[in-house]
Image (cartoon, grey):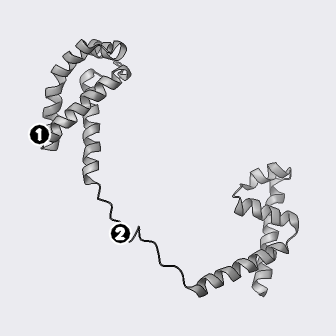
Amino acid sequence: MSVLLAAVGRDRDVAAFEVLFRYYAPRVRSYMARLARDRQAAEELMQETMVVVWNKAGQFDPERGNVSTWIFTIARNLRVDAYRKTRRPDFDPNDPAFVPDDSPPADFEVQERQEADRLHGAMAGLPPEQRELLKRSFFDEIPHSAIAADLGIPLGTVKSRIRLAFAKLRAVLEER
C-alpha cells in the first residue's frame, strides 16, 4: 500500500488512488460510523479523509508508520475537528461578555482627567533625562536594557534614574 500512496503523492496516479480508495474508504466509513453514530456524518468524514489522503499523499513517510496508521490518524483528527465544531456554542450577541459596559459617570471621567493632568504636570517638572526614560519605559514599553543600549548608558544608570523619577513623582503627587 505504501507503494500506491507514494505513486499518488509523487505522480498524482489516479489508478493507484482508486485502489487505495476501494480498500480504505469502506474501513474508514465504518470507523467513522462507530465514532459518530450517524451514517451521513460517517460518509462525509470518509470523503474528507480520502480527499486529505489525495492532497497530502506526498507527505507520507513510511519510516514513521504504515499507510493504515497514517490514514486512520487523518480520519481521527477530522472526526475530532467535526466533534469540536458541533459542540461549539452558538454566538449570542446578548451574552454579557459581548455587551459593552455602560459609560462611566461624568464625575469619574472628570476625576480621571484631573489625575491625568496632575501626572502630566508632575512629569513636566522632572529633569528631561528622567522624563525621557519614563516615557520610553512605560509609554513606549521599551525594556530597560534596550533603553540603555539606545542611549549608550549603563543599565544601572537607567534603573537609578527611573527610581529617582518615581520618587519625585510620588512626592509631587502626594503634596497635591
Q: Sort mark 1 into few (<14), some (14-19) or many (20+) by Cα contacts within 10 Å.
A: some
Residue at 60% x, 87% y is 107
Distance from disc 1 to disc 2, alpha carbons, whole Å, reads 35 Å
Residue at 11% x, 39% y is 39
**Residue bearing mark 2:** 95
Residue at 35% x, 22% y is 60
Residue 39 is labelled as 1
Q: Is residue 43 left or right of residue 127?
A: left
Q: Sort mark 2 into few (<14), some (14-19) or many (20+) by Cα contacts within 10 Å.
A: few
Residue 154 in view? yes
Label 1 secondary element: helix
In the picture, the quarter occupied by the N terminus is top left
Quadrant for residue 14, please give it.
top left
* Relative to 126, residue 107 above or below: below
* Relative to 152, residue 163 above or below: below
Label 2 secondary element: loop
Residue at 74% x, 79% y is 117
What amino acid type is highlighted by mark number 1? Arg
x then y, percent, for residue 163:
78, 68
Residue 79 is labelled as none
